[in-house]
Structures are given as C-alpha cells and as structure tokens.
Image (tube, rainbow, N blue to C red):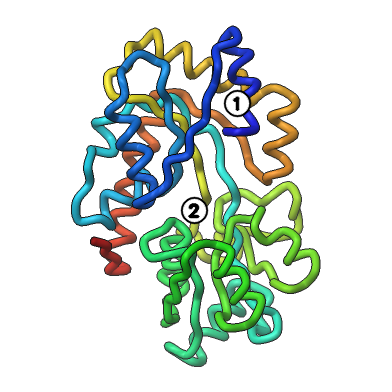
Amino acid sequence: MRAAGPSLSKVLGGQAVVIENLPGAGGTTGTLALVKAPTDGFTIGVVSNNHAVNPSVFKKMPFDALADITPISVVGATPFILVVNPKSVPAKTAKELQAFLKAKPGGYNYASSGNGTIIHLAGEMFIDAAEVDVKHIPYKGTGPMVADLIGGQVELGVVALPAIQGHLKSGALRAIGVMGKQRVPSLPDLPTIAEQGFADVDIGGWFAVIAPAKLPAAEVKRLHEAVVAAFATPEVKEAMARQENLINPMSPEASAQFFRSEQERYTRLVKKANIALE
C-alpha cells in the first residue's frame, strides 16, 4: 500500500493518503481501529489472510470479521512456496518429500512465522494433504524462520516468495512447489503442489482493502474504482511485480463472498490442526 499510496492520492483528486501501521494481535489491533472509525469513506484499512484466520484461532475477538466491515476489494496475492533445506532433505518434488517424511514419522520439523499465522496454516495444509507426521516449530516472524531453514535447524517450511527469492537463486533453499493453484511468472518451471498430486493444496498470501461497516454504496463504488485504478498505474504495477505480488482486484461483492469462504475453510483447517490462541 505504500507503493500504491501516491497513485491512489492522484486517482482521488489529490486527496492525501496517510498510511498508518497499527501492528499487534495478528492484525486485530489495526482492524479494531478501522471498525471504530466514522463511516464516511475517509478511513480504509488493508488486511491479509489473518483477518479470516483470527476468528477461529483467538478465543475472543473484539469485532465481527464479517459483519463489522465493508469489503472494497481483495486486491491481489503473494505466492507461498514450500521449501526445504537442500543439505538435509534430498527431495526435489512434493511426492519425494512426502516419502522422505513418511520414512521417519515425527523425526523432522517444519517452521512457521508463528502459531496461528497463515504461514502456520499453509504448512498444516501440506502436512494434512501429504498425511505425514512432522513437528511444528513456530518462530517470531519470517526472518528468524528463514535463517533457521537455511541453517538446517528445521527441514522445511512455507514462505512468501519475496522473502526467499534470493535464497532460491543462491541454492541456500530448494523450492518444492507453489502452494497456490497458479504457477509464478518468475519461476515458470516450478510446478504447484496441486499439480504434483495434492489437489486440495491451494493457499497464498492475499491482501484486501476494507472500510467500516455500512459504508454507503456510492462510497463503496468510488473507493473500489480508485483502488483498481491505482493498482493499474505503470509505477504501481512495476512495484507489485518487484514484490512478486499477483494483482487481480475483486469486486466488493466477490470480495465479501471470498471473505466468507476463506473464514469457513480456515476454521476447518484450524480445528483439524487443533490450533488455539488466548
């Protein structure tokens, strides 16, 4: 959004776009500030998968993730890649990795960027599909997770592509497959996990623009058109390509349905993996 901010300002006729980071509690801190904001079209928020994950991993939520927002657009997604440490894991395909893990149940570790994160759920999705027994090692963020993957303290993990692109090129990590349904333009020869025989694996790091609940239809239309136009400008398209983001803005109606379906499927996955946070 920092890359898109200047273009969004121009599209909105010179309206200032101030970006405020409000981290904490898996994104709920920032979203809580949004849902309490006036419903006037001047306060919007950007959320990711955790907006749909949090209701099923936290015992209490300070807002309703569906009823207390107005979807503007699910703008795009960042590909997730299943990777392994090449020194400790000989597997080069998803089926080979499955066989490697099955040969020693409970003997290997997979990393995540933290309990209940979308990266955690992405790892669980592969483990569930492959029917393997692997120990989960949560880290406090992607940086320490990737460092230990490279160091060999953990054998495998799912990571957003921008965080590991250089490590794939250097050979410090080996990519097994793309976790989403589509191949990545910058890695055209890397098949998806679904292509490799695990049809139910489909997950990526999406991001969306939302507003407080009950935003008037005219404001929803105005903001949606502005977001679409901003992300279509050459400078923003170039920035998104550098970040490996795949941009395909959804309509407000499609975004609302997407939020519902994502929350439903993450709830099922969280229950199956027995994930719970305070």
Task: Locate residue 135, reporting x and y percent.
Answer: 42, 81
Task: Locate residue 93, reporting x and y percent.
Answer: 65, 73
Q: Secondary structure at mark 2?
A: loop
Q: Secondary structure at mark 1?
A: helix
Which residue does the image show at 66% across and 53% down from the upper left? 162
Of the two numbered discs 1 and 2 in the rendering, the one whose residue sits closer to the viewer: 1
Residue most toward the left? 60
Q: Is residue 255 above or below residue 241?
A: above
Quadrant in the rendering for residue 278? bottom left
| Residue ID for mark 1 | 5
Return the disc, 1 or 2, that comes first in the chain's sequence.
1
Front in this rendered view, residue 258 or 193? 258
Using residue 235 as the reference point, say whether residue 194 is left or right of it: left
User: Real-space Cα distance between discs 1 and 2?
Assistant: 27 Å
Using residue 15 as the reference point, say whether residue 265 is left or right of it: left
What kind of residue is marked 1?
Gly
Using residue 116 as the reference point, say whether residue 194 is left or right of it: right
Using residue 41 as the reference point, say whether residue 164 is left or right of it: right
Which residue does the image show at 41% across and 61% down from the upper left? 121
How many marks the image carries: the answer is 2
